[in-house]
Image (cartoon, helix red, strand yellow):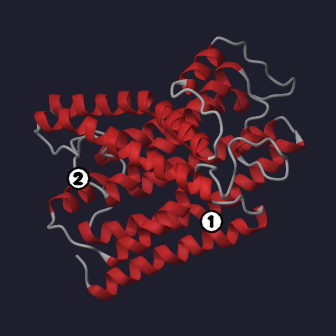
C-alpha cells in the first residue's frame, strides 16, 4: 500500500462525508427555485445534522438491539460504498477487496437492516415502508447490476477502478450501449434514492412515502445517522454515474498533481448532476406505488438491451 494510495483513500472518505450533505442541499435548493418556492439554505442539511446530533434519542419501549445498531450499520455501508467508488483517484487500497457486485451487496445489506429495523417496533407505517423498500430493491438491484455489467464488458473487469481507467484512457467514442444503460441507471438512481417520480422525500403521506416511513420511529443521533446515510447514498449513486459515463478527471495512480485537480472537477460534475436531478424531479409527477414495478422493469429491460448491444457489436 503506497502512501499516495492511502492519502487518496482518506481523501475519498473525507470528501464523501463533507460533500454528501452539500449535494443534498444543492438539489433541494434548485428544486425549490424551479418550483417557484422559497429555497432553503445551501448548508441546511449540515444544520439539521447538527441539531439532531445534539438531541436525545427516544427509543420505543419494545425496540430490540437491532433497532439500535441499524443506523450505525446503514451509515457504515453507505460510507464504505462511497469509499470504494473512484471519485478522486483510481489508486484506492479498498478497491481490490470490493468490486461492482460487492458494491450492490452493500446497498442490499443497508436495505435489509433498515427494513428489519422499521418492522422491529411493530408500527403499521414501519411495516408498510419496509415492504415497499424491499419491493423497490428487489427490482432495482438487478437493473443496477446489468448497468455495471454493461460497463464491465468493455474493461473485462468488474472492478470499478479498472472500468474507470479503461474508459478514461480510450479514444473518445460514443457507445450505443451506454446511451441505453445511462437511461436505465438514471431510473434506478431515482428509485433507490427515493426521488420523484418513485417517491417524494418531502412528504409524510402514508399512501406515497417509502423512505420516510422507514425512519419515522427514529430521533436524535440515530435519525442524524440515517439522514447522513441517505445523503451518502445519493452521493455514491452520483459518483457511480460519473465513474461509468463521465470518467474524465479522475486521477490515476502515482499522480499527486492530478489528485489535487480531481477535487474541483468532481465538485463541478456533481453540481451539474445535482441541477439535472432537480430538473427531472421538477418536470416529473409522482407515480402511483403500483406503477413502480413497471418503471423499474423498464429500467431492467433497457440495461439488458445495453448489454446485448455490447455483445452484438463485439465491444471489448
Q: Can residue 191 be seen in this view?
A: no
Q: What element carries label 2?
A: loop
**The one of 151 and 267 positioned closer to us in this rendering:** 267
Q: Quadrant of residue 134?
A: bottom right
Q: Quadrant of residue 135?
A: bottom right
Instruction: Assign the C terminus to one quadrant of the image.
Output: bottom left
**The one of 221 and 109 positioned closer to us in this rendering:** 221
Residue at 41% from the left image edge and 33% from the top image edge: 16
* For residue 168, above or below residue 36: below
Q: Is residue 109 visible?
A: yes
Q: Is mark 1 on a helix, strand or loop?
A: helix
Residue at 53% from the left image edge and 53% from the top image edge: 279
Q: Name the residue under label 2.
A: 248
Q: Residues within 10 Å of mark 1 (few under 14, many from 20)?
A: many
* For residue 284, above or below residue 222: below
Q: Position of residue 157 (x, y in %)?
A: 28, 63
Q: How far apart are marks 2 and 1 (CA)?
A: 30 Å
In this rendering, position of residue 24 left or right of residue 270: right
Q: How crowded is mark 2: few (under 14 residues within 10 Å), some or many (20 or more)?
A: some
Q: Quadrant of residue 58?
A: top right
Q: Where is residue 95 in the image (x, y as percent from the top left)?
A: 30, 45
Question: Which residue is the extreme one toward the front?
Answer: 36
Question: Which residue is the extreme one toward the bottom?
Answer: 312
In this rendering, position of residue 315 left or right of residue 48: left
* For residue 133, above or below residue 265: below
Of marks 2 and 1, the one in the foreground: 2
Q: Position of residue 4 (x, y in %)?
A: 16, 31
Residue at 70% from the left image edge and 44% from the top image edge: 211
- Are the residues flagged by discs 2 and 1 in contact, CB closer than 8 Å? no
Q: Name the residue under label 1.
A: 139
Amino acid at each position: 500500500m503506497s502512501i499516495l494510495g492511502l492519502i487518496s483513500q482518506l481523501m475519498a472518505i473525507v470528501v464523501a462525508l463533507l460533500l454528501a450533505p452539500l449535494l443534498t442541499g444543492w438539489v433541494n435548493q434548485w428544486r425549490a427555485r424551479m418550483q417557484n418556492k422559497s429555497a432553503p439554505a445551501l448548508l441546511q442539511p449540515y444544520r439539521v445534522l447538527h441539531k439532531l446530533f445534539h438531541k436525545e434519542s427516544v427509543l420505543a419501549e419494545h425496540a430490540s438491539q437491532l433497532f439500535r445498531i441499524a443506523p450505525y450499520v446503514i451509515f457504515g455501508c453507505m460510507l464504505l460504498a462511497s469509499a470504494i467508488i473512484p471519485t478522486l483517484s483510481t489508486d484506492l487500497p479498498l478497491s481490490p477487496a470490493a468490486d461492482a457486485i460487492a458494491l450492490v451487496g452493500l446497498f442490499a445489506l443497508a436495505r435489509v437492516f433498515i427494513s428489519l429495523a422499521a418492522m422491529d417496533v411493530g408500527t403499521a407505517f414501519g411495516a408498510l415502508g419496509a415492504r415497499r423498500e424491499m419491493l423497490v430493491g428487489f427490482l432495482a438491484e438487478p437493473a443496477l447490476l446489468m448497468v455495471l455489467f454493461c460497463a464491465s464488458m468493455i474493461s473485462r473487469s468488474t472492478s470499478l477502478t479498472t472500468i474507470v481507467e479503461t474508459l478514461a484512457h480510450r479514444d473518445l467514442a460514443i457507445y450505443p450501449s451506454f446511451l441505453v444503460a445511462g437511461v436505465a441507471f438514471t431510473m434506478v438512481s431515482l428509485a433507490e434514492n427515493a426521488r420523484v417520480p418513485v417517491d417524494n422525500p418531502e412528504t409524510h403521506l402514508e399512501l406515497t412515502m417509502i423512505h420516510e416511513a422507514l425512519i419515522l420511529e427514529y430521533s436524535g443521533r440515530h435519525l442524524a445517522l440515517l439522514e447522513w446515510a441517505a445523503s451518502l447514498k445519493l452521493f455514491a449513486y452520483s459518483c457511480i454515474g460519473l465513474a461509468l459515463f463521465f470518467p474524465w478527471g479522475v486521477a490515476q495512480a502515482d499522480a499527486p498533481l492530478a489528485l489535487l485537480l480531481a477535487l474541483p472537477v468532481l465538485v463541478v460534475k456533481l453540481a451539474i448532476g445535482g441541477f439535472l436531478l432537480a430538473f427531472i424531479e421538477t418536470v416529473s409527477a409522482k407515480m402511483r406505488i403500483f406503477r413502480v414495478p413497471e418503471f423499474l422493469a423498464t429500467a431492467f429491460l433497457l440495461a439488458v438491451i445495453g448489454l446485448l448491444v455490447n455483445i452484438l457489436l463485439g465491444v471489448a
